[in-house]
Amino acid sequence: MFDNKNASTLNSLIATTLDSVDGYRKAAEEANAAQYSDIFLTRANERQAIVTKFQAKVRELGGNPEDDGTVLASAHRAFLGLRDALTGDRDDSAVVAEVERGEDHIKAKFESALKDEDLDPAVRQLIQTSYASVREGHDQMSALKHQLNAS
């Protein structure tokens, strides 16, 4: 039997998390310092693992898992690429600031999903477990941004 409510919630989080994967990979390409590239790639891999788990659960619920990010994120990345091409603004602090903005968004999406009282307990637990990684990534990027701004 298809569980539309839980599958829909997971698919929304999959799309947002895929945006995060793409954002971290792009940040790894744009970063000047290898240490930041490594951090971004590690986070991208963590987010990809979340996507894989969520997609498996959607299949288990009888749904078709999302496999694309959001249109809004694609437009945002295109805008950033154009801005960078015009301004040459590619220093590490700008890259980290952009990643942190993305982290604010994904963290809010997970928090919103967790407020849904109608979620199946197993789905809620899956989201809660994954949220720990999202929160950790958000906090790491926030700390990194403040560290770079202080230098």
Image: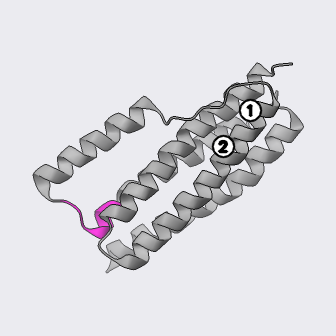
Q: Which residue is mark 1?
A: 58
SS category of the residue bearing label 1: helix
Q: Secondary structure at mark 2?
A: helix
- 44 shown above or below 15: below
Q: Residue type at mark 1?
A: Val
What residue is shown at x 43% (from left), y 51% (from top)?
A: 23
Q: Which residue is mark 2?
A: 111
Which residues, given as a range, are shown in magenta? Answer: 89-96
Relative depth, front residue between 121 and 26: 26
- State yes or no: residue 94 in magenta: yes
Look at the image and tell me whether residue 100 can be seen. no
Amino acid type at image mark 2: Glu
Q: Is residue 5 magenta?
A: no
**Can you give x and y, in whole percent of width and height, for residue 56 in the image?**
74, 40
Left or right of 125? Residue 139 is left
Q: Visible in this render: residue 132?
A: yes
The residue lying at 56 percent from left, 45 percent from top is 17
| Residue 146, image quadrant | bottom left
> Which of the two labelled residues, at mark 2 and mark 1, occupies the earlier sequence position?
1
State whether the magenta stretch is mostly helix, strand or loop.
helix
Q: Image quadrant for the C terminus?
A: bottom left
Between marks 2 and 1 in the image, the one whose residue lies nearer the viewer? 1
